[in-house]
Image: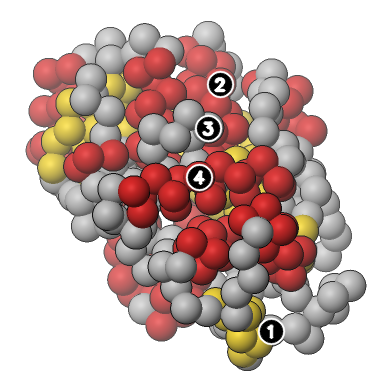
Amino acid sequence: MAVLVTGGAGYIGSHMVLALIGAGESVVVLDDLSTGFKEAVHPKARLVVGDVADEKLVGSLIEEHKIDAVIHFAAKLIVPESVADPLGYYYANTVKTRALLAAVVAGGVKHFVFSSTAAVYGNPEENPVSEDARLYPMSPYGSSKLISEWMLRDVAKAHDLHYVVLRYFNVAGADPEGRIGQMTKNATLLIKVASETASGKRNRMSVFGTDYPTPDGTCIRDYIHVTDLVAAHLDAMRYLRAGGESLVLNCGYGRGFSVLEVIDTVKRISGKDFPVEIVGRRPGDPAAIVARADNIRKKLGWQPQYDDLATIVTHALAWEDKLKDRGLA
């Protein structure tokens, strides 16, 4: 029995592989390395370089390794980019997920954990937002993930497949032991960008809009530590293996921070002041989105360990220092 992790050489995927290996699982990683890094994959996992839409390849991996669970991360995930390239996002996030599911069904895999997003809610009418709130994505990224959720729901009804969909809020931080972290080139996630600016990798950073209907005018998000996020996936897989029914769950802490609050926290913890440029809004950005996160605790028994913005920032900054020491910053 083994777990197939698609996109396992990426930021979140590599942390997932680390957690799975730590739990004694046999792990196969499928990644095309378009944005992932070979060196980020734990040496005890088997890395296969290939496309998740290659049904023949996925089928052979399922058969060879006796895959009983798939954790699907592989996707494009930059909201403004999706607005500029909707067809690219529907292809990468929806069409390729359809092909992966076809191979999963053909191979008899019964457990599927899907990486979705809070972007399916768009600009919610209420915060914190619950899983049964209106779904109204503001970007092709959110729409591509929502269509994949629907497709997974329908496939599971027709076949012997159970799933957990985890709708992520804003993922940040790095492995607390400093073993891995985000290596993404031209990263867009706020805490990563602010940490790179504090470390000197960037000369300045931008704040996209200060005219939102929030206390300080900047967007509010629920930031979740990457290690807590992958722990939720591990809990989801165990839940499914124990016979659990299919679920859709928010994955956040239930508390939001504004862009300016995050930047101030990075400056305070790093001890570095750095230039911040105020520019116009980005397309597809909701004003505020915070998770109602009680269901994931009740259903999966998830117990986050790093629910603290300062801790998330501290780990992100430590990772930037490590990259600089390796000459990679």
In front: 88, or 322? 322
In front: 134, or 258? 258
Helix, strand or loop at label 4? It is helix
Give coordinates of residue 20: x percent, y percent.
39, 21
In front: 169, or 246? 169
Image point (32%, 22%), residue name: 3
For the residues marked 2 and 1, what is the alpha-carbon distance in whole angstroms? 37 Å
Q: Earlier in the sequence, mark 4 or mark 3?
A: 3
Asked whether the residues under the numbered discs 2 and 1 touch, taking CB atoms below 8 Å apart as contact, a structural biologist would say no
Callout 1 crowding tier (Cα within 10 Å): few <14, some 14–19, many ≥20: some
Give coordinates of residue 317: x percent, y percent.
53, 50
For the residues marked 2 and 4, what is the alpha-carbon distance in whole angstroms? 27 Å
Q: Disc 4 designates what residue?
A: 318
Tell me the quarter of the picture where residue 250 sits.
top right
Give, as a three-letter code, the residue at label 4.
Ala
Image point (61%, 86%), residue name: 277
Eyeballing the image, is 247 above or below 252? above
Question: Does the image show residue 118?
Answer: no
Q: Earlier in the sequence, mark 4 or mark 1?
A: 1
Q: Determine which of the numbered discs, if any, sits on residue 235 in the image.
A: 2
The quadrant of the rendering that contains the N terminus is top left
Q: Determine which of the numbered discs, if any, sits on residue 176 in the image.
A: 3
Give, as a three-letter code, the residue at label 1.
Gly
Q: Determine which of the numbered discs, if any, sits on residue 19 in the image.
A: none
Helix, strand or loop at label 1? It is loop
Question: Does the image show residue 87?
Answer: yes
